[in-house]
Amino acid sequence: MLIPKSRGNIKKLTELACSDDTDLWAMDEVRFQLHGSRCRMWIPPETKDPVVYHHPTRKAIGYFGAVRLRDGKFMFHRAEKFNAESFFLFLRDLRTVSSHAGRRVELILDNASYHHAKLHEKWRQKSRSRFVMNYLPPYSPELNPVERVWKLVRRMATHNSYFSNLDEIAIAVERTFARWHLGNNSLRRLCAII
């Protein structure tokens, strides 16, 4: 199902987010580069030309992540590559975690080619009654609530920080993710669609 930008579908998503028998999840992929990120900061007035160190490389670490809009519960998986196989592993784990309460799962995600891969097409068809994937229109990341989570994680874990290797950035990012494992009111409000 494709989610167009319309008031009717926003109303449908709002109803799903408030439903007792359906869990609405938003999922996406993200990469955190080794050099971290820089933002505005306060410096002492005597420092005229501040030096902010960063690692001179484009190495990055990738994650699949999903947030349940009802309560802010967050789930993630580290991924070396974003492809059909790694996405399928994440989907199966997400379905296992989210189906314990017996609720139907509605997933909001973008239109990456591996989200439609033949590798997991039979599984998607078989699971359609309890696990539905709602695809956003192409080139519309602003419609996916989990994009706000990535911005928050960067602010909390990587802004103005130096990481000498990928393990250090993974520790910083996963420490932030771990806070949201059981649900979080801040994430719920951040990702609210109502």
Image (spheres, grey):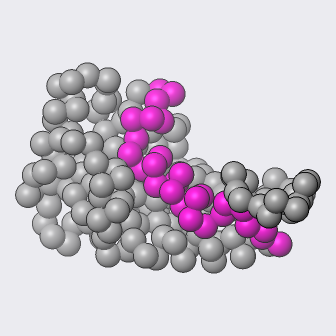
Residue drawn 32% across the image and 29% down it: 2
Residue in the foreground of this view, choosing between 7 and 135: 7
Q: Where in the figure is residue 91, as x and y percent of width and height?
A: 39, 58
Residue in the foreground of this view, choosing between 87 and 125: 87
Q: Is residue 94 visible in the rendered structure shown here? A: no
- Image vertical order of residue 108 relative to residue 35, above or below: above
Residue drawn 38% across the image and 74% down it: 181
Which residue of the protein is positioned furthest toward the front in this rendering?
45
Q: Is residue 115 visible in the rendered structure shown here? A: yes
Q: Where in the figure is residue 65, as x and y percent of width and height?
A: 46, 59
Q: Where in the figure is residue 47, as x and y percent of width and height?
A: 88, 60
The quadrant holding residue 158 is: bottom right
Magenta range is 138-164
Q: Quadrant of the C terminus?
A: top left
In this rendering, the count of numbered labels is 0
Residue drawn 73% across the image and 54% down it: 38
Which residue of the protein is positioned furthest toward the left in this rendering?
20
Asked whether 158 falls inside the magenta stretch, the response is yes
Residue drawn 46% across the image and 55% down it: 149
Query: From the viewer's perspective, is 97 left or right of 138?
Result: left
